[in-house]
Image: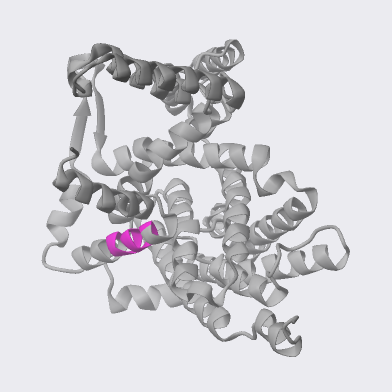
Amino acid sequence: MVNIAEQKFEKFRSPFQAFVRDESLASIFLFLAAVLALLAANSPLAEQYFALVHLPIILGVGDVALRFDAHQLINDGLMALFFFILGLEIKREFLVGELRDPKRATALVAAAIGGMAVPALIYFLFNQNTSSQHGWGIPMATDSAFALGVLLLLGDRVPLNLKAFLVGYAIIDDLGAIMVIALFYTDTLNINYLGISVACLTVMIACNVIGLRHFFVYMATGILLWAGLMNAGVHGTVAGVLVALVVPARAKHGRLWFLRRAQKLIDKVERLEKRERVQEKILGNPQQHGAVEAVEQAAALATTPLRRWERSLEPAVLWLILPLFAFANAGIPLSWERFAELSVSPIAWGIVGGLVIGKTVGISVLVWLTVRLGWGRLPDAVTLPHIVGLALLGGMGFTMSTFIAVLTFDVDNELYLAKTGILIASFIAGLCGYLWLRFCPDERADKAVKEPPVA
């Protein structure tokens, strides 16, 4: 008989697992981490907060040790895993997701292009011919976790397909941000280390071609690729995307093979069960235990490493790495003197204008134009007013925008202005997006009222 406590735990575990994998709910935790960092940086504990963020960390022994502080380890190391998950999502969407449909993909690409080009242009106009003009990549990014969190608050007031559209748009937007980081925020290249990185990537491609699907092989080679890119002058998070692109996306065996294999193993367990006069616990029956394990192995061979690894690593990224990033980067000391400086800063105005106005105009206009010309189409139940609300939410650029800001500015004061501008813009964009979608006319409801139900 199954333990009663275990039965109760099983009832609790399933909804908990769904909760842990919900990106929109994880955004609440991300928000709380950012608020906690702000409170800590502006409290009597500020000294301890900054000491913790820059705590020295040594990985290794003696001369072969790598030395970081906690801030570097999070931004340069752990965030590579975040980019790995992003890369897996991008690859999956292109293979089997929304991006397979040419017309829907066209609307998503139009939204991403408008949401990147117009904000970058607005920032550049505010900062042209200044030392900060190279920060044009900061307002190009959208934080999909925060945006999904706002849509979660709206519930069924917005169609479910709008959330799918946001995810598809954010994936292309993230891909654009990754390309910007790789092409424009890379230091002087070291050819020798770059050659090592290319060799590591070649090994992983070969593993994919010959059908090698062991997680350890890809992760071990991926770590070497990360170290090579870091020493070559390319930011290490690019390694996460490159590894994701070569992860096998096909199963070793098809569904029919799995069905036959699983049925044979189930029949074997039944025969063993009938052969025993007294039913023995599986712990004491090596043959039954082996047969059940074989079913698990068959399931692994009939699924793709891409989807399996994505599902396994997603909770750690959503609930640990992103909140750590927020906590390590959102701690900004606030003061009236600095707010006065912020009000005349082209960096802050460029970021706020780019994220709030640039995203709204760029996404809305290009999607409208694409649909109007018949080049693309919106998902079912999604209307152009919904797209305007989504465009406003696109101005929530916290995670990726902050990441690019850290890569852009070496001077503390400039980085402060950029981070503060990102926080202000994200708050304005989130509030405006929520209010727009909360109170904008719902064409679905209007249509339901005008059209009587069919008898």
Percent x, y for residue 392?
58, 72
- Residue at 44% across / 73% down in the picture? 153
Estimate the x, y position of residue 137 in percent, counting from the top left. 57, 53
Percent x, y of residue 322: 36, 50
Quarter of the image for the N terminus: give it.
Answer: top left
Q: Is 188 positioned to the left or the right of 370 in the image? A: left
Residue furthest to the front: 277
Q: Verify whether residue 40 appears in magenta.
A: no
Counting every numbered tag in the picture gives: 0
Given residues 255 and 132, the one toward you in this image is 255
The outermost residue toward the right is: 373
Q: Which quadrant of the view contains residue 136?
A: bottom right
Vertical placement of residue 197 versus 36, above or below: above
Q: Quadrant of residue 28?
A: bottom left
Place of residue 405 in the rendered image (x, y in percent of width and height, measured from the top left): 45, 53
Which residue is rendered at x = 17% and y = 17% of the image? 284
Range of magenta residues: 26-33
At horizontal 40% and vertical 48% (from top left) the residue drawn is 410
